[in-house]
């Protein structure tokens, strides 16, 4: 079995004249925390619904656990879903909500399974309080517990921190880490890259239904690291000067002309002077500092509709 447990190929969903998801491709490996980032209206929920088996694609393929899946496929049962507002019974306790879900699943030894889930998400199993009196964070943890019923291999969370206060966000973040440590692969969507960057290991940026970039956490942080960008005639010759004359080794050659220098202790003037002394013509040099939010906005703009 390959390390990829989810793969989508040319996945498309069209509603009348609008393509909500347009020829999307990506792979998710076992153990990933896969961040699906995009502004409101970019198609995140539609894409997650197709992966979770809630709606059918117009075209394209979904491969789960090394198998191409069709409608009503059993592999969808290995996924736990929290997409949009998962229904909970406000006049019942957390235990009763989970018990009703367990009955619908036909689970045996329900009591132990429910107690384990409540412990896992940090809710008191002896608490008889009605869910309607819970905080937003507690309700969200209960919804995640419901999604975990049946011990799924993959957990899909659609905008799980929406409407939460800072404490609630921190609690959900810790819960995601804890769940991932147990071996669960997690797909989590958000329109806030800054927050998603604290948990995800890999990202797909979605805009107007299309994946415009697949990027790892390491690559993302590197893109946003302070650097000096320099354009020269011959990057291969320039890096020899950087290393031998300036002691600069923390750099990345982007192509045959562009170099990103991450050792910013050497100033732009010093770099330009040393290159010129060695007959390396510098076309441009600039300092670059970019926040995660700026990186995201550069790729998606400020657009996006109001509903996903």
Image (cartoon, rainbow, N blue to C red):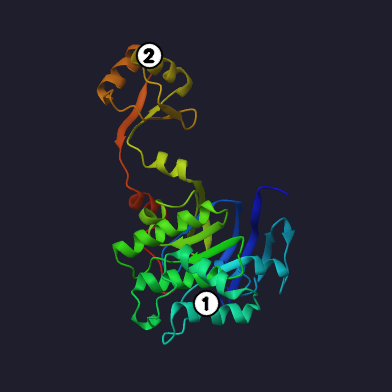
Q: Secondary structure at mark 2?
A: loop
In front: 158, or 228?
Answer: 158
* Residue closest to the eye, 229 or 157: 157
Image position of 223 (left or right of 53): left
Q: Is residue 46 visible?
A: no
User: According to the image, label 1 marks what residue?
Assistant: 98
Identify the residue shown where x is 34% and y is 16%. 246
- First in sequence, mark 1 or 2: give its number: 1
Q: Determine crowd level at label 2: few under 14, some 14-19, many 20+ residues with C-alpha closer than 10 A.
A: few
Where does the image place residue 293, in percent across and percent down from the top left? Answer: 34, 53
Seen at 61% across and 69% down, the residue is 150
| Local secondary structure at mark 1 | helix
Q: Residue at x 65, y 73 (%)?
A: 56
Residue 62 vs 125, above or below: the answer is above
Any mark on residue 279, and which?
A: 2
- Residues at marks 1 and 2, CA–CA distance in whole angstroms: 72 Å
Quadrant of residue 193 within the rendered picture: bottom left
């Amino acid at each position: 079995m390959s390390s990829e447990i989810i793969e989508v190929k040319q996945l498309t969903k069209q509603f009348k004249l609008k393509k909500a998801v347009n020829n999307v491709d990506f792979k998710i490996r076992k153990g990933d925390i896969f961040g699906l980032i995009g502004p409101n209206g970019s198609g995140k929920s539609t894409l997650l619904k197709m992966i979770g088996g809630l709606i059918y694609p117009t075209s394209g393929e979904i491969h789960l656990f090394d198998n191409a899946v069709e409608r009503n496929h059993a592999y969808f049962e290995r996924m736990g879903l929290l997409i949009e507002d998962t229904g909970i019974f406000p006049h019942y306790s957390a235990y009763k909500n989970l018990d009703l879900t367990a009955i619908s699943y036909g689970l045996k030894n329900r009591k132990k399974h429910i107690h384990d889930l409540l412990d896992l998400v940090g809710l008191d199993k002896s608490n008889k309080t009605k869910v309607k009196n819970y905080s937003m964070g507690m309700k969200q943890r209960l919804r995640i517990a419901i999604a975990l019923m049946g011990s799924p291999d993959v957990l899909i969370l659609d905008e799980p921190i929406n409407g939460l206060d800072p404490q609630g966000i921190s609690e959900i973040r810790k819960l995601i880490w804890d769940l991932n440590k147990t071996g669960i692969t997690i797909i989590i969507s958000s329109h806030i890259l800054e927050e998603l960057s604290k948990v995800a290991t890999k990202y797909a940026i979605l805009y107007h239904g299309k994946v415009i970039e697949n990027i790892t956490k390491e690559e993302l942080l590197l893109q946003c690291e302070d650097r000096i960008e320099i354009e020269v005639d011959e990057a291969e010759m320039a890096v020899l000067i950087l290393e031998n004359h300036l002691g600069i080794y923390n750099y990345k050659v982007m192509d045959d002309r562009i170099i990103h220098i991450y050792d910013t202790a050497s100033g732009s003037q010093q770099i330009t002077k040393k290159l010129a002394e060695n007959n390396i013509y510098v076309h441009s040099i600039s300092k670059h500092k970019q926040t995660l939010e700026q990186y995201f906005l550069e790729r998606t703009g400020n657009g996006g509709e109001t509903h996903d």
